Image (tube, grey):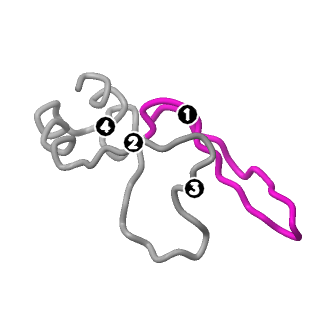
Protein backbone atom coordinates (compact mmCIF):
# COMPACT_ATOMS: atom_id res chain seq x y z
CA UNK A 1 0.00 0.00 0.00
CA UNK A 2 2.85 2.41 0.70
CA UNK A 3 3.80 2.35 -2.99
CA UNK A 4 0.27 3.41 -3.98
CA UNK A 5 0.34 6.28 -1.49
CA UNK A 6 3.68 7.39 -2.96
CA UNK A 7 2.27 7.24 -6.49
CA UNK A 8 -0.78 9.29 -5.52
CA UNK A 9 1.22 11.89 -3.56
CA UNK A 10 3.37 12.52 -6.64
CA UNK A 11 0.22 13.48 -8.55
CA UNK A 12 -0.80 17.14 -8.15
CA UNK A 13 -4.45 16.11 -7.75
CA UNK A 14 -3.70 14.29 -4.50
CA UNK A 15 -0.67 16.10 -3.04
CA UNK A 16 -2.72 17.71 -0.23
CA UNK A 17 -4.43 14.47 0.83
CA UNK A 18 -3.43 12.92 4.16
CA UNK A 19 -2.19 9.33 4.27
CA UNK A 20 -5.52 8.31 5.83
CA UNK A 21 -7.48 9.98 3.01
CA UNK A 22 -5.25 8.30 0.43
CA UNK A 23 -5.78 4.90 2.08
CA UNK A 24 -9.55 5.42 1.90
CA UNK A 25 -9.25 6.36 -1.77
CA UNK A 26 -7.10 3.32 -2.50
CA UNK A 27 -9.71 1.06 -0.89
CA UNK A 28 -12.25 2.38 -3.42
CA UNK A 29 -9.99 1.67 -6.39
CA UNK A 30 -10.27 -1.36 -8.61
CA UNK A 31 -6.95 -2.88 -9.62
CA UNK A 32 -6.54 -4.54 -12.98
CA UNK A 33 -3.64 -6.00 -14.86
CA UNK A 34 -3.21 -5.63 -18.59
CA UNK A 35 -0.92 -7.54 -20.92
CA UNK A 36 1.54 -6.02 -23.35
CA UNK A 37 -0.30 -4.76 -26.43
CA UNK A 38 -3.72 -4.79 -24.76
CA UNK A 39 -5.93 -1.79 -25.55
CA UNK A 40 -7.17 -0.01 -22.42
CA UNK A 41 -9.42 2.52 -24.16
CA UNK A 42 -9.92 3.95 -27.62
CA UNK A 43 -10.45 7.40 -29.03
CA UNK A 44 -14.13 8.27 -29.26
CA UNK A 45 -15.22 5.54 -26.82
CA UNK A 46 -17.87 6.31 -24.22
CA UNK A 47 -16.17 7.90 -21.18
CA UNK A 48 -16.59 5.63 -18.16
CA UNK A 49 -15.11 8.18 -15.73
CA UNK A 50 -12.12 5.97 -14.93
CA UNK A 51 -8.80 7.34 -13.77
CA UNK A 52 -5.75 5.18 -14.41
CA UNK A 53 -2.59 4.96 -12.32
CA UNK A 54 0.36 2.96 -13.59
CA UNK A 55 1.98 0.74 -11.00
CA UNK A 56 4.53 -0.86 -13.31
CA UNK A 57 5.44 -0.80 -16.98
CA UNK A 58 4.76 1.68 -19.76
CA UNK A 59 1.52 2.83 -21.35
CA UNK A 60 1.63 4.29 -24.85
CA UNK A 61 -0.97 6.67 -26.20
CA UNK A 62 -1.27 6.01 -29.93
CA UNK A 63 -3.08 7.68 -32.80
CA UNK A 64 -3.73 5.88 -36.06
CA UNK A 65 -3.92 8.14 -39.07
CA UNK A 66 -3.80 7.16 -42.73
CA UNK A 67 -3.02 3.59 -41.68
CA UNK A 68 0.02 4.52 -39.61
CA UNK A 69 0.35 4.52 -35.83
CA UNK A 70 1.95 7.51 -34.17
CA UNK A 71 3.00 7.57 -30.51
CA UNK A 72 1.55 10.70 -28.90
CA UNK A 73 2.79 10.05 -25.36
CA UNK A 74 4.31 7.41 -23.12
CA UNK A 75 3.66 7.10 -19.39
CA UNK A 76 5.41 5.09 -16.70
CA UNK A 77 4.73 4.63 -12.99
CA UNK A 78 2.36 7.22 -11.62
Res 15 label? 4
N-term-proximal mark, 1 vs 4: 4
Q: Residues within 10 Å of mark 4 (few under 14, many from 20)?
A: some
Q: What is the distance, in whole Å, between disc 4 and disc 3 at their CAs?
A: 29 Å
Residue sitting at 40 percent across and 39 percent down? 11
Res 56 label? none
Q: Quadrant of residue 24?
A: top left
Provide the secondary structure element on which disc 4 rests: loop
**Left or right relative to 70: residue 34:** left
Mark 3, residue position: 39
Mark 2, residue position: 12
Task: Identify the magenta region.
Answer: 54-78
Quadrant location of the C terminus in the rendered image? top left
Provide the secondary structure element on which disc 2 rests: loop
Query: Pointer 4 and pointer 2: residues touching (CB < 8 Å)?
Result: yes
**Left or right relative to 51: residue 38:** right
**Percent position (x, y) of residue 34?**
48, 44
Provide the secondary structure element on which disc 1 rests: loop
Provide the secondary structure element on which disc 3 rests: loop
Q: Quadrant of residue 17?
A: top left
Res 76 label? 1
Q: Quadrant of residue 26?
A: top left
Q: What is the distance, in whole Å, between disc 1 and disc 4 at their CAs?
A: 19 Å
Q: Is residue 7 above or below residue 35?
A: above
Amino acid sequence: MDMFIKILKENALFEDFTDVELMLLIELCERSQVTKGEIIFTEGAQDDGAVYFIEDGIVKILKTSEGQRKILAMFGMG
